[in-house]
Amino acid sequence: MQIRLVQDPDADTLLSTEPFALLMGMMLDQQVLMEHAFAGPAKVKERFGSLDPAAIAAAEPEAFVALCAQPPAVHRFPKSMAARIQSLARHIEEEYGGDTARLWEEASSGKELLARLRALPGFGKAKSQIFLALLGKQAGVQPDGWREAAGDYGEEGAYRSVADIVDPDSLARVRAHKAEMKAKRRA
């Protein structure tokens, strides 16, 4: 699997090879550009030295906030997102023994995987469906019923979310779709 969400080879390789990086990037994907959200895990790894969920969960909270706030910040809301990253790491440590991939590898169906994702801190229905679609479309994680569980985000050939970004052209198409949806909501 080669994820290309940041359009930066090092950050994208991290997303492709470290499951917690991909999960953290998805959690950070709110109120910032997608590329900035998914670049966050690379910043954390560079500054913290690890993306091990146990180590992140055990980090002293104020020091972790400072690490996330250091320019360029991991997110535009570094304090709240640092706490969410640590909460997500604790959940992975407690529920999956620190092995992020177990979250999806042990799910027997798309419905079960969606429920597991929805149980994560910072993951609502849409974010969970988008991440499920990302796993299915780009990581080959396709338990029975994954497209149905992902809803519209699972549709083949769509350009709705990060699940559909594989290069600069698809990024532009997703951005155009989001702008169109935003305009429709305003109308």
Image: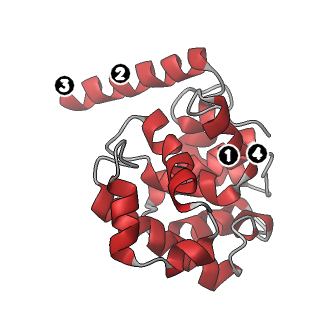
Residue position marked by numbered label 4 in the rendering:
139
Residue position marked by numbered label 2 in the rendering:
180
Between discs 1 and 2, the one toward the N terminus: 1
Residue under the image location 35 percent in, 21 percent down? 180
Residue under the image location 49 percent in, 25 percent down? 174
Circle 3 residues within 10 Å: few <14, some 14–19, many ≥20: few
Residue 16, image x, y percentages: 72, 44
Q: CA distance from mark 2 to mark 4?
A: 28 Å
**Element under label 3?**
loop
Residue under the image location 34 percent in, 23 percent down? 179
Residue 62, image x, y percentages: 32, 73
Residue position marked by numbered label 1 in the rendering:
14
Q: CA distance from mark 3 to mark 4?
A: 36 Å
The residue type indicated by label 3 comes to: Ala
Mark closer to the observer (3, 2): 2
**Element under label 1?**
helix
